[in-house]
Image: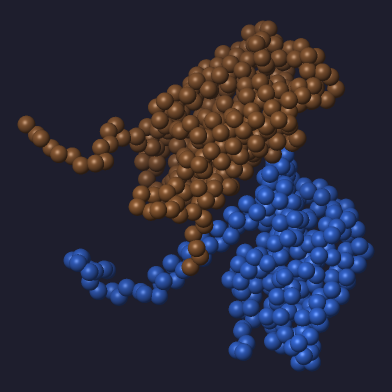
Amino acid sequence: MGLLTLSSPHTHGPNSTSKVMAIVALATVPGLIAMTALFGWGTLINVVLACAVALASEAAILLLRKRPVSFFLKDNSALLTGVLLGLALPPFAPFWVTAVATSFAIVFSKQLYGGMGNNPFNPAMVGYALVLVSFPVQMTTAWALSTQMTGAPAMGFADTLSVIFAGNAHLADAFSGATPLDAYKHLIAKSTSDDVLAQATFNGWLNGGWEWVNIAFLVGGVLLILRRIITWHIPVAMLSALTLCSLMFGWDEDMYTPLSLHLLSGATMLGAFFIATDPVTASTTPLGKLIYGAGIGILLFVIRTWGAYPDAVAFAVLLMNFAAPFIDAYTQPRTYGHSKARRGLPEKK
Amino acid sequence: MATKSLRDISLDGLWNNNPALVQLLGLCPLLAVTGSVVNALGLGLATMMVLVGSNFSVSLIRNHVPDAVRLPAFVMIIASFVTVAELVMQAFTYELYEVLGIFIPLIVTNCVILGRADSFACKNPIIPSVVDGFMMALGFTVILVLLGAMREVLGQGVIFSNMQLLFGADAAHWKIELVKDYPDFLFAILPPGAFMAMGILIALKNVIDDKLKQRAQAQQAPVEVGSRRVRVTGKIS
């Protein structure tokens, strides 16, 4: 009979990096299913393609850097970058857009800084911002219309493959169009809210299916909080800041995108729960997380409302990534044994 | 100051102390105009003309200008040569002059030129100064053209486009289309792409330098035939 007296800390069921990353990737499955069911096969194909490219480029750079390849590939972080990029990119984006975004994310944004855990910017969002800036045509015209918007079944698997890999973009003509955020922003300039919402893009309950996608990501995100993979701070701060901004500055639906669309359209929920919460690039202190999340929410509203782009999760997250180390330095909690929290930047020697 | 051999001066300019890769001088034109090979080559040649001329003149007057006013004097000389270069470009390659625009007069502020005048030409005789000016400018131009080529290929999928701006109408068909229907890769055309390409070139130079150093070390300590390895029994044949 072993009566071992174990001293603290009493850890149990350790969370390895590999496991955490796998759980986050799995938590995107509801969103992925919603995207595939409503918008067709494009997103699923993108996710598979992006994962393959992410793993291949990670392996190639690890070989160049003479690091153990299988050890780092097994931590699933490259896989997660691939999954997030695949979900974020337009469903009908040509294969080379996905490939460029993913390889740039892994090679330049992650491995050049020293690999897993050393990157100051969220790799997936760097890849997304790169292709958004570089290929504006493909990134704005390749969005799929949902089955609710067209009232017809989504495009078949073979045709989708042909659009993505063979460049037969004309096949997608009947299935692609502006996203609700884009449409609302442009149409509201010359008509009233009621007229805009009568468009086919806003069929269904709210905005032609995007609301279900966002709710699915919200469900996945709540699961992550319940599993204690992420804390509530960043998503709650981000969504509240977005809500507050929208109520204060964008309450007039005949001029600005309404709150319901801000919260349940575009990449809001994907950004709030899966992208902004990246443990490497986000703020790490409890107060810091609140500031960091609120910053993303405010930037998201500002860029969506007054900027040139219809959605802004990538830019908002990247801008706050810049600020995260600074926020961390000024929000350190009091440590046990000290009477006061040590805050501020470390003194130069 | 011990005079360096012309060979060392040339090696410094082209490789060891390359103005673009090692000194990181003149980054503004380097990053701004290297969108294509022809722009890069045009600016490189103009810089070369100015640098050779200014090094020559500064070396001529090096014993007659008091230290206190040397910088204004150098800048005057450089500005005169830039004006000459500008007029020459207006006369012979007017379209390229239009394309490069403000970056031609801005050669005056290129630190490479003032740097070489102050750190080399004002302390050395004419021939080494001219060689230094030429080699530094050549090193700068080579990097400009490399950057231009990288960004033209990545950004537009072509190379040597619009060469007629510099080499006359015959050069119009030098353009090589590497990829059909290439979608413009705006990132490579915009300045961030230049920073990235520059970073890659610097990294490549460092890799090559490391390899050279390792090889030199290996050659410096030749293993004597018949000597024993430490804790190894076999003999080296």
Which one is in front, B104 or A6?
A6
Residue A111 position in % (x across, y down): 49, 47
Q: Which chain has been coloured brown in this picture?
A: A
- Residue projecting furthest to the front: A339
Which one is in front, A306 or A162?
A306
Residue A61 visible (yes or no): no
Residue B11, picture quadrant = bottom right
Residue A105, picture quadrant = top right
Which one is in front, B76 or A305?
A305
Quadrant (top left/top right/bottom left/bottom right) for the N terminus of chain B: bottom right
Left/right placement of residue A59 relative to residue A98 reads: left
What residue do we see at 50% from left, 52% from top?
A: A329
Q: Which chain has been coloured blue in this picture?
A: B
Which one is in front, A141 or B66?
B66
Residue A85 position in % (x across, y down): 56, 32
What residue do we see at 44% from left, 23% from top?
A: A223
Quadrant (top left/top right/bottom left/bottom right) for the C terminus of chain B: bottom left
What residue do we see at 77% from left, 76% from top?
A: B52
- Residue projecting furthest to the right: B91
Compared to A255, does A202 lie above or below?
above
What residue do we see at 74% from left, 12% from top?
A: A200
Residue B103 position in % (x across, y down): 81, 61
Q: Which colour scheme is used?
A: by chain
Residue A295 position in % (x across, y down): 61, 39
